[in-house]
Image: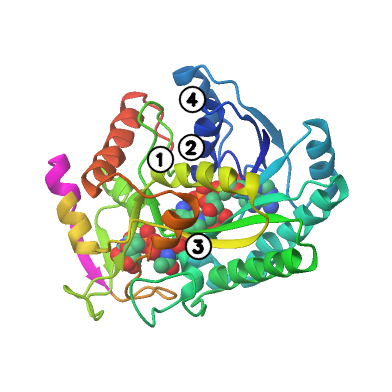
Amino acid sequence: MNILLTGGTGYIGSHTAITLHQNNHNVILYDNLTNSREETLFKIKTSLGLNLKLVIGDVLDTKTLEDTLNKYKINAVIHFAGLKSVDESITQPKKYFENNVNGTHSLIKAMKAVKVKTLIFSSSATVYGEPKYLPIDENHPKNPENPYGASKLKVENILKSLSMSDPSWKIVCLRYFNPIGSHEDVNIGDNPVGTANNLFPIILKVLKKKIKILEIFGKDYDTNDGTGIRDYIYIMDLVEGHLAALNYLKLNSGWHDVNLGTGKGYSVLEIIEKFQSVNNVIIPFKYSPRRKGDVSESYADVRKAKELLGWEARNSLDVMCKSVLKYFVLEQTSKKNVF
Ligand code: NAD
Ligand code: UD1
C-alpha cells in the first residue's frame, strides 16, 4: 500500500515508517518539522539503508496535502501530526485546537477530494481523564483534564461523525498510553525540538546533566507509593499496533477505537528504581507539587486490541528501560548532542 504518515518525522511516526517500509509498504512522510528534524531521515538511511521520502508541509495546508495524496497515489493515511504537550496546551489552548482539530479538518477535506477513505488516528489515553475505574476500557467516559486531551477528543468525535455520515470510511482511532524507548538499530528516539515534558526524555536530560535533578510531580496521589501510575509501552510494540490496524481496515469499514497499552501500570518511583537497576545508573530526584493536567493513575484494558486487531504488547519494562539508555549512549557516542 502507499501510506501517508502526517507527522512522519516525529517520534512515533519515524519508528512506524521503518516498520511499514520493512513490511513492503510504500511510505511517504508529511511533516512541518515543528517538533522533529530532517536529520532523523539521514540517521535511518545511514543505519538501515532506507531512503524515506519526506514532503515538508503543514496539515493545515489542504492544497499541498491534496497534491501529495494525488502525486503518490496514497491508499491510506496515518495521522500522527499534532502538538502533544499537556503543559503548553494549558497556557496556549487555542494553538492546540487550531493545530490538532483544524489540522484534521484540513486532512479530511483533502482525503475526501481524492477519495482516500482509510485513516488511522493517533489519539491518547489522556481523553479518558481521571479514571472512574481501572483498567480503562474503550467505553470508559471521556473527560479530558487538559486542552490537549480535549483537542484529541474533539478530533475523535469529528471522525466518528464522519464515519456515521459516510459508512464507507475506514477509521481506526488508536489511544496510546505511554510509549517509550527506541528502535534497536537506529539512534532515533523521543527527542522533541521544544521543551521536553515527558518522563523519559527528562530522565535522559538528567543523564546528560542538562537537568540537575528529576522532579517527581506529586507524592500524594492515591497510589501504592503516592506517585503517578502510567502504562508504559515499548515503541516498537506500539508501531506493530499500527500494522495490525492497517490489516484490520483491509476488510472492515466504520469507526473503531482501540487502546494501545500493556495493561500494567507502574508508578514514577517504580520507573526510577527499574531504570536505575537495569542500567546501573543513578537518577537523582526530588518531590515537587503535582503537575497541572495530570491524572493519578492510568492503565489500559487491552482486550479489545487483542480481539479486534489480534495485537498485544510483548516487551517488558526492562527492555524499555534498556532501550532508553541505549539511545542515550548512541547519542553520546555520535557526539551530536542535540538535547
Ligand atoms: P512528535 O511531536 O514527535 O511528532 C508529531 C509530529 O507532527 C512532529 O514531527 C511535528 O513536527 C508534526 N506536526 C505537528 N503539527 C503539524 C502540522 N500542523 N503539520 C504537519 N506536521 C505537524 O509526537 P509523537 O510522540 O510522535 O506523537 C505522535 C502523535 O501521537 C501525536 O498526535 C500525539 O498527540 C499522539 N500521542 C503521543 C503520545 C506520546 O506519549 N508520545 C501519547 C499519546 C498520543
Ligand atoms: C500524557 C498522556 C498521554 C499523552 C502524553 C503527551 C495521560 C494518562 N497520558 O502522558 O496520553 O499523549 O501526555 O505528552 O494523560 N512525571 C514526573 N516528572 C517529570 C515528568 C513526568 O514525575 O519530569 C510523571 C508524571 O506526573 C506522570 C508520569 O511521570 O505521572 C508520566 O508523565 P509523562 O511522561 O509526561 O506522560 P503523561 O503525562 O502520562
Question: Crowding near pointer 1: few (<14 within 10 Å), some, many (20+)?
Answer: many
Q: Quadrant of the N terminus?
A: top right
Residue at the (51%, 80%) spot, across then down: 143
Task: Point out the stretch of residues depicted in magenta.
Answer: 275-288
Q: Earlier in the sequence, mark 1 or mark 4?
A: 4
Identify which residue, 16 or 42, lies in the foreground.
16
Disc 1 target residue: 236
Q: Is residue 215 above or below residue 306?
A: below
State the image coordinates of residue 34 (x, y, percent, origin top left).
62, 47
Q: Give the label, 4 or 3, closer to the camera.
A: 3
Looking at the rendered structure, the secondary structure element under dot 1 is helix
Q: Determine which of the numbered discs, if any, sits on residue 15 in the image.
A: 2
Q: How was the colour assigned to the protein in this rendering?
A: rainbow
Q: Is residue 323 left or right of residue 307?
A: left
Residue at the (28%, 70%) spot, across then down: 228
- Residue type for callout 1: Met
Q: Is residue 138 magenta?
A: no
Q: Determine which of the numbered discs, if any, sits on residue 124 in the image.
A: 3
Looking at the rendered structure, the secondary structure element under dot 2 is helix
Q: Is mark 3 within 8 Å of ligand 1?
A: yes
- Residue type for callout 4: Lys
Q: Quadrant of the C terminus?
A: top left
User: Disc 4 to disc 2, how far (Cα)?
Assistant: 12 Å
State the image coordinates of residue 164 (x, y, percent, origin top left).
74, 68
Q: Earlier in the sequence, mark 4 or mark 2?
A: 2
Q: Is residue 282 magenta?
A: yes
User: Disc 1 to disc 4, how far (Cα)?
Assistant: 17 Å
Disc 4 target residue: 43
Q: Earlier in the sequence, mark 2 or mark 3?
A: 2
